[in-house]
Amino acid sequence: SRCHRCGLCETRTQTVFGSGNPKAELVFVGEAPGADEDKQGLPFVGAAGQLLTTIIEHPRSMGLSRNEVYICN
């Protein structure tokens, strides 16, 4: 929350770090949080996050839950 290495610090209202299992074997890393992520303080909660959740949770795809993986920016 004290980082000022890039321009994100100038417009963010929250620090968006990660969610899920920090010891997961599978990690998804996003480029940077968007407005939805900044508003909720969680990674991948906007439209792209909804698609990612579908891919992770669909039984014919990965069949996992978001709590079984780690998602961060």
Image (cartoon, rainbow, N blue to C red):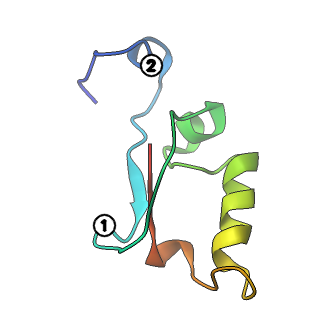
Q: Residue at x 65, y 38 (%)?
A: 36
Image vertical order of residue 54 relative to residue 41, above or below: below
- Residue bearing the label numbered 2: 8
Image vertical order of residue 1 relative to residue 27, above or below: above
Residue type, label 2: Leu
Secondary structure beneath disc 1? loop
Mark 1 neighbour class, 10 Å CA radius: few under 14, some 14 to 19, many 20 or more: some
Badge number at residue 65: none
- Image position, residue 37 (x, y; %): 57, 41
- Residue bearing the label numbered 1: 22
Q: Is residue 61 left or right of residue 38?
A: right
Residue type, label 1: Pro
Q: Is residue 28 left or right of residue 21?
A: right
- Image position, residue 25 (x, y; %): 36, 74
Mark 2 neighbour class, 10 Å CA radius: few under 14, some 14 to 19, many 20 or more: some
**Count of numbered labels shown in the rendering:** 2
